[in-house]
């Protein structure tokens, strides 16, 4: 069991080790960031973006929430996307879900988790409802939940495409590419579901004037 004191001790040890490996490490770290990737992932503690991707600090801009969602009402996520895409000029936006997601599992239950969580999970329930016919044909509950994880990732890519931020970047900078991935806790591997290149088709009702 870790204590707050032990966390400071671990930080001290880590900082010392980094400085020994590269005396200029913190100088470079403090000079600024130019990440090529924005990672939108689940807040699950078992899914750390940099470790999964084998990247170092400064190489990926990260936003995480319950069940890796991009909701129209989430100012936090939308501000991260706007900053990463329009100001940092990331070349790739990755939405990465994971099998065994507690948010997806909870959304399938009828439990009352409290008003805020109920509201947050409602969007996943809607993804389930939209795909209920296909999901109902899947033999096991585990496989069905895994498919819903995938459908949820695809829905978030759709949400990204429908933002003025992405459409503006596609028109003005010819980027970024949008990627929908799923991570397996059992294998440590990433599965690619979709990659939407700049100017991929968007339903007309979601196209912003002068951006399409």
Image (tube, rainbow, N blue to C red):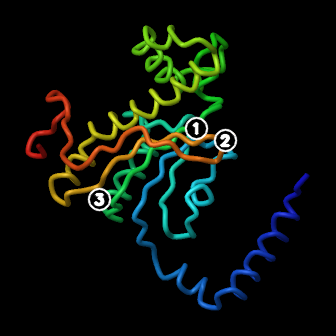
State the image coordinates of residue 192 (x, y, percent, origin top left). Answer: 45, 43
Q: Please tell me which of labels 2 and 3 falls first in the chain.
A: 3
Quarter occupied by residue 67: top right
Q: Can you name the residue that lies furthest to the left here?
A: 210
Mark 3 lies on a secondary structure that is helix
Residue drawn at x 48%, y 30% is: 150
Q: CA distance from mark 1 to mark 3?
A: 27 Å
Mark 1 lies on a secondary structure that is strand
Q: Can you name the residue that lies furthest to the right here?
A: 1
Marks 1 and 2 close (CB-CB < 8 Å): yes
Q: CA distance from mark 1 to mark 2?
A: 7 Å
- Residue 114, placed above or below residue 78: above
Please rate how many residues cluster around mark 1, counting C-alpha atoms within 10 Å: few if below 14, some from 14 to 19, many from 20.
Answer: many
Mark 2 lies on a secondary structure that is loop
Please rate how many residues cluster around mark 2, counting C-alpha atoms within 10 Å: few if below 14, some from 14 to 19, many from 20.
Answer: some
Q: Is residue 105 left or right of residue 158?
A: right
Please rate how many residues cluster around mark 3, counting C-alpha atoms within 10 Å: few if below 14, some from 14 to 19, many from 20.
Answer: some
State the image coordinates of residue 138 (x, y, percent, origin top left). Answer: 54, 13
Marks 1 and 3 close (CB-CB < 8 Å): no
- Residue 5, placed above or below residue 107: below
Count of labels shown?
Answer: 3
Q: CA distance from mark 2 to mark 3?
A: 32 Å
Q: Can you name the residue that lies furthest to the bottom here?
A: 23
Residue under label 2: 185
Q: Please tell me which of labels 1 and 3 falls first in the chain.
A: 3
Between residues 82 and 97, which one lies in front from this camera angle? 97
State the image coordinates of residue 175 (x, y, percent, origin top left). Answer: 25, 56
Residue drawn at x 53%, y 84% is: 28
- Residue 3, placed above or below residue 46: below
Image mark for residue 98:
1
> Which quarter of the figure is the C terminus placed in?
top left
Residue under label 3: 86
């Amino acid at each position: 069991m870790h204590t707050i004191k032990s966390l400071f001790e671990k930080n001290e040890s880590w900082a010392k080790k980094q400085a020994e490996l590269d005396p200029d490490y913190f100088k470079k770290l403090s000079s600024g960031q130019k990440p090529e990737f924005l990672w939108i992932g689940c807040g699950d503690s078992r899914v750390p973006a940099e470790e999964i991707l084998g990247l170092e600090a400064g190489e990926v801009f990260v936003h995480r929430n319950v069940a890796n969602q991009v909701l129209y009402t989430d100012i936090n996520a939308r501000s991260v996307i706007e900053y990463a895409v329009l100001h940092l000029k990331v070349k790739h936006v990755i939405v990465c879900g994971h099998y065994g997601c507690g948010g997806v599992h909870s959304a399938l239950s009828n439990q009352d988790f409290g008003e805020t969580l109920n509201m947050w999970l409602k969007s996943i329930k809607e993804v389930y409802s939209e795909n209920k016919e296909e999901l109902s044909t899947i033999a096991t509950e585990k496989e069905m939940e895994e498919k819903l994880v995938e459908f949820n990732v695809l829905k978030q890519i759709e949400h990204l495409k429908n933002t003025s931020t992405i459409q503006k970047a596609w028109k003005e900078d010819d980027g970024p590419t949008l990627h929908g991935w799923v991570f397996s806790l059992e294998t440590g591997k990433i599965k690619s579901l979709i990659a939407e290149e700049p100017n991929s088709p968007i339903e007309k009702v979601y196209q912003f004037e002068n951006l399409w």
